[in-house]
Structures are given as structure tokens and as C-alpha cells.
Amino acid sequence: DAGVIQSPRHEVTEMGQEVTLRCKPISGHNSLFWYRQTMMRGLELLIYFNNNVPIDDSGMPEDRFSAKMPNASFSTLKIQPSEPRDSAVYFCASSLRISGGAGETQYFGPGTRLLVL
Amino acid sequence: GQNIDQPTEMTATEGAIVQINCTYQTSGFNGLFWYQQHAGEAPTFLSYNVLDGLEEKGRFSSFLSRSKGYSYLLLKELQMKDSASYLCAVRDRGRGSTLGRLYFGRGTQLTVWP
């Protein structure tokens, strides 16, 4: 079975450029999560979707960040314009959330390592 | 939000037992998870507790006390491959019918020596 797929795996860009990260969740999963991991702040949730609808975007740092999920098999996280402090590993995760089911497990993709110069 | 605290680093030797503690303060508790993350890789799920007590899964066990806001991950018969960061994560209660979101601790870097 294919796990969560993310692309690109590595991205080096210059400050001010637009960056688009892509994620394909596990087939059949109905929830998708975007996380950012840095040494300073650890693993932080940016936004999550349930059935393609954004549920909680309180972790999105600022207006430069935006996320979309046009269908159940694809999501993007866009940073425009990018800044050096955005350098981090960005993980996408997916899960199957069942109403009343508490034992939901999130499966993480391999991550995108972003470096903004 | 949540306040999750776990030790930054721990070391142990092969074959030993190690216990990684996690304490949390939450405005609405809905489950505690442990994830393992090897350097340069993604976190992978280890265990889940929502009721008090011990959950055992092979060499790994996880314990939860909701009244104390406390959990631990117990690793037995340590192997070199267990060297990794172990992340404690707490899920809160979502709004309405939605499940909540996960809040991760900073992780405990475990080094296993031969």
C-alpha cells in the first residue's frame, strides 16, 4: 500500500519566491493534516481538513500561508512570499476519522525539507 | 491549548529497560499518543491511550493516568535501532462532532549504547 506521498522532498528557494508543497493522502482516509517541524518549536499543526473542508487553521502562521484540498486525494500548502524563517520540514499526515471512534491514527508522509535563503 | 512536557534526552544500554515520562495540562483531554521519529524520517505511530492503565504492545508499553495528567512509554529489551526521538502527543476535544487535534511535545531523544 502506498503511504502518504509528498512532493517535492527537498526545496531550496530564495526569499520572496512562492513555494508550493503537495500531498496525496492514503486512499480512503478522510482527514488530512499539515505540520511544520523545527528545532526551536518542535512539531506544530498548521491546518487540518476533514472531508476536504478546513476544520482548524489556527496554526497557520500568517497570511503568507494558505492551504487547499480540492479533492479527497490532493492537498497543497502554499507560502507566498517565502521568508528564511519558513525554513523547516513540512509534514503531511492523513487518517480515517470515524464519528465516535477515538482510536484514530495519523500516518505521516516523508516530509518536505524547505530551505529559504 | 495544551502544555506537554517530556525530557529532552535520555540514554540507555542495549538490553535495558527505559521509561520516558510525559506530563500534560489540557483544557479537554481526548487521548494520548506516542510516536517514534528516527533522524531525518517521519513520525510513526507507537501507541494510544484514552483510558487509565497500561497498554502493552510487544516490547513497548504505554501508561496513562488522566487524573495526574501523566503518561509514560516503557521500552524493554532495548536495541540499537530504538535510538530515536519519542514524541508524546495529546488530542483535545474538537468542536461539535469533530475529533480534536493533536498537540505534540518537543520529543525525547533516546540514545541506546552497545
Image: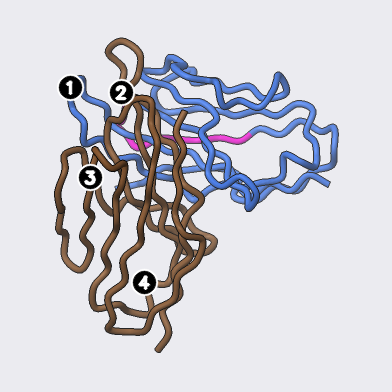
Q: What colour scheme governs how the chains and residues are painted in the rendered image of this protein?
A: by chain
Q: Residue A91's spot in the image, x, y percent?
A: 52, 42
The colour one sees for chain A in the rendered image is: blue
Circle 1/circle 2 CB separation < 8 Å: no
Circle 4 residue: B82
Q: CA distance from mark 4 to mark 1?
A: 33 Å
Label 1 packing within 10 angstroms: few (<14), some (14-19), many (20+): few
Circle 1 residue: A100
Q: Nearer the viewer, mark 3 or mark 1?
A: 3
Q: What element does badge 3 sit on?
A: strand
**Residue shown at 66%/46% (left/top)?**
A88
Point out the stretch of residues depicted in magenta: A21-30
Q: Residue B36's spot in the image, x, y percent?
A: 38, 58
Circle 3 residue: B65
Q: CA distance from mark 4 to mark 2?
A: 31 Å
Q: Nearer the viewer, residue A111 or A63?
A: A63
Circle 2 residue: B99
* Image-based side of B103 in relation to A10, left or right: left
Q: CA distance from mark 2 to mark 3?
A: 21 Å
* Image-based side of A21 in relation to B42, left or right: right
Q: Is residue B81 magenta?
A: no
